[in-house]
Image: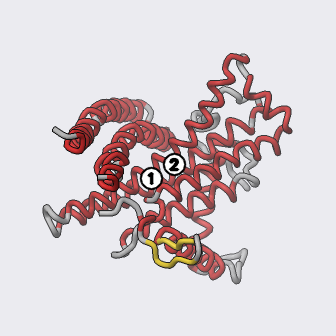
């Protein structure tokens, strides 16, 4: 295999794996966060406003980890620096 | 498929490129300013209010309550900055219902610029509230060993602000385009709805995080140095009055 093939193969494989593995933990964490929030709201329905606001802030922070993985995948697929150097040079 | 509206250059002149991001940003700015001007032309104190004044009073009151819960009772100097951040991002994410529109927050340049505004606003507000000495002192706050952590924390917070907003909005516009190939009619509509929801949530998150960073740096004189969300955990009531 020449280096172009290796770069293309590596980029595509890692783009898929990044997204696949990188979204396991945020999904589990978000599920746990929502379940705790629901439990707290059930315990104290008066504070439901505050609790859901804090829940959303927390969910966005957890989500951002999955978003970082997504951004890496997109960079590998669409604006891959090695690929562009290869196609410009070769 | 393009991943950001930065790549579509509409007009070039010398080294200045006018790309789609800039044009949509100007359009959003013009729209917000025009609407605000139209709404505040004839303000009245007693009811009946005009419709526009009613809407804007509702929006401003809600924003003020939310910011007040994070920063404290005296927010008149923070409200313009955080409120503008929220309005710009919310409007720019709301307009994705228009067909050929690409949100400028879906481009890393815009989100990096907004995150840099927050990055510079935190020292400015902190110095205005506590002086240069007070601001520099908070870097060595629990102990001088924490200095690299604080600096790293500042840079990382700015970076995550930018990438979080960029990633959410770009993923929405890209997935809607990609799903057109699979189920042409129904799925993109559902994804667009999801994208609208995510867009509004991300606008709120951006504004809330910006106000949390400002509060944690600027309100140390009230003894709330270590807490990040001081008032949000205390009771459910909003502060009445101004």
As helix, strand or loop, the secondary structure at mark 1 comes to helix
**Number of numbered discs visible in the structure rendering:** 2
Chain at tag 2: B
Chain at tag 1: B
| Rendered image: mark on residue B113 | none
Q: Return the residue at label 2.
A: B162
Residue at left offset 60%, top offset 37%: B155
| Viewer-closest of B40 and B28 | B28
Residue at left offset 57%, top offset 46%: B208
Q: Is residue B49 visible?
A: no
Which quadrant does the C terminus of chain B fall into? bottom right
Q: Residue furthest left?
A: B183
Q: Residue B140, position in %: x, y?
A: 74, 23
Q: Residue B74, position in %: x, y?
A: 76, 48
Q: Residue A51, position in %: x, y?
A: 47, 38
Tell me the crowding category of disc 2: few under 14, some 14 to 19, or many 20 or more residues within 10 angstroms, Cα based.
many
Residue at left offset 41%, top offset 31%: A40
Q: Is residue B183 visible?
A: yes
Q: Return the residue at label 1.
A: B166
As helix, strand or loop, the secondary structure at mark 2 comes to helix
Residues marked 2 and 1 touching at CB (< 8 Å)? yes
């Amino acid at each position: 295999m020449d280096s172009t093939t290796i770069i293309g193969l590596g980029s595509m494989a890692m783009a898929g794996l990044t997204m696949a593995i990188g979204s396991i933990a945020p999904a589990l964490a978000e599920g746990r966060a929502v379940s705790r929030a629901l439990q707290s709201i059930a315990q104290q329905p008066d504070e439901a406003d505050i609790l859901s606001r804090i829940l959303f802030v927390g969910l966005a922070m957890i989500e951002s980890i999955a978003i970082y993985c997504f951004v890496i995948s997109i960079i590998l697929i669409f604006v891959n620096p090695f690929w562009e150097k290869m196609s410009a040079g070769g | 498929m393009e991943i950001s509206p930065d790549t579509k250059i509409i007009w070039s002149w010398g080294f200045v490129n006018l790309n789609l991001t800039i044009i949509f940003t100007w359009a959003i700015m013009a729209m917000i300013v025009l609407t605000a001007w139209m709404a505040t032309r004839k303000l009245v104190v007693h009811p009946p209010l005009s419709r526009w004044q009613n809407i804007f009073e509702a929006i401003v009151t809600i924003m003020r309550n939310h910011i007040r819960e994070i920063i404290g009772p005296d927010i008149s100097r923070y409200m313009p900055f955080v409120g503008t951040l929220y309005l710009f991002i919310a409007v720019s994410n709301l307009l994705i219902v228009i067909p050929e529109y690409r949100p400028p927050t879906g481009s890393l340049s815009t989100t990096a610029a907004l995150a840099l505004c927050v990055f510079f606003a935190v020292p400015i507000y902190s110095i205005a509230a506590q002086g240069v000495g007070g601001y520099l002192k908070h870097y060595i706050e629990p102990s001088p060993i924490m200095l690299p952590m604080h600096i790293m924390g500042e840079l990382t917070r700015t970076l995550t602000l930018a990438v979080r907003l960029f990633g959410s909005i770009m993923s929405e516009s890209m997935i809607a385009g990609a799903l057109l190939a699979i189920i042409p009619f129904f799925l993109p509509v559902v994804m667009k709805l999801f994208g609208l929801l995510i867009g509004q949530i991300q606008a709120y998150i951006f504004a809330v995080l910006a106000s949390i960073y400002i509060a944690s740096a600027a309100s140390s004189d009230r003894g709330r140095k270590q807490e990040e969300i001081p008032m949000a955990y205390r009771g459910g009531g909003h502060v009445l009055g101004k």
